[in-house]
Amino acid sequence: KNEVEQSPQNLTAQEGEFITINCSYSVGISALHWLQQHPGGGIVSLFMLSSGKKKHGRLIATINIQEKHSSLHITASHPRDSAVYICAVLYTGNQFYFGTGTSLTVIP
Amino acid sequence: DSGVTQTPKHLITATGQRVTLRCSPRSGDLSVYWYQQSLDQGLQFLIQYYNGEERAKGNILERFSAQQFPDLHSELNLSSLELGDSALYFCASSAGFTSRGGLETQYFGPGTRLLVL
């Protein structure tokens, strides 16, 4: 079954904290995407991973293919990071499946 | 601004009606994707087009259809609308260096909010 599980569902952090959001999937994938959805609804693609680790500013994404697990880290969190973070995986056949999202609130 | 445009931004219609959502990809992007986001189902992949051809199909209902035109814009047609079709519909595009669009960064449009009454 092509499931994508994210944890936690909700996360509240103080400004400056290090944040980790996790994504697990059930079978082998071709790629994994991390998306950010702002309160207004707009979606931005943060990372596309097929292996290893990527870094962009204060954001770091890692993937462990053997363990079928990916993490999104936010260092020195800021209130503007408040958003819903969504994991999406590409299974064979070009099918995308999405996690239910992690709602992050960063308090000043 | 992602460079992907979607029209209309909002659409209110009645059950049984038909609507067309339009998407213009970023300049030069060959792949277009359609997604549905509803409160109960979350984000779902509907369909992908690559340079005018259908490349992947997700959870798209038979009442829904899409196409990509020679100028690369795409339309999503929703017919015999039901209350449950109320959702935010996103279009995204990617460069299309590979027809396997999942291996490329996608750029999302602002979405069309559909309300079926």
Image (cartoon, coloured by chain):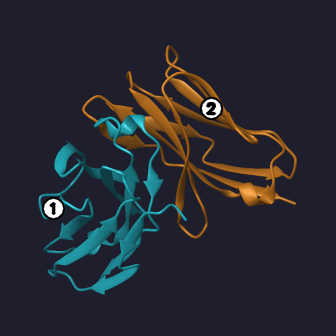
Chain A drawn colour: orange
- Say which of A85 and B98 sits in front: B98
Residue A71: numbered disc = 2
Percent of width and height locating residue A24: 51, 30
Question: Where, by quadrant of the figure, is residue B26 drawn?
Answer: bottom left
Q: For the point 30% across and 38% down, which residue is it?
A: A95
Chain letter for mark 2, please: A
- Depth check: give the residue in front, B88 or B4: B4
Measured from the top left, where is residue B56 in percent x and y? 22, 42
Residue placed furthest toward the top: A66
Which residue corresponds to the image point at 27% horizontal and 72% vertical from the top-left? Answer: B21
Quadrant that contains the N terminus of chain A: top left
Subunit that carries the residue with mark 1 = B
Q: Name the residue rendered at 86%, 52% in the picture.
A: A15
Q: What quarter of the picture does the C terminus of chain A occupy?
A: bottom right
Q: What is the three-letter code of the residue carrying label 2?
A: Ser
Q: Which mark is residue A84?
A: none
Question: Hue of chain B?
Answer: cyan
Q: Residues within 10 Å of mark 1 (few under 14, many from 20)?
A: some
**Which mark is drawn over residue B65?**
1
Residue B25: x %, y % from top left: 36, 60
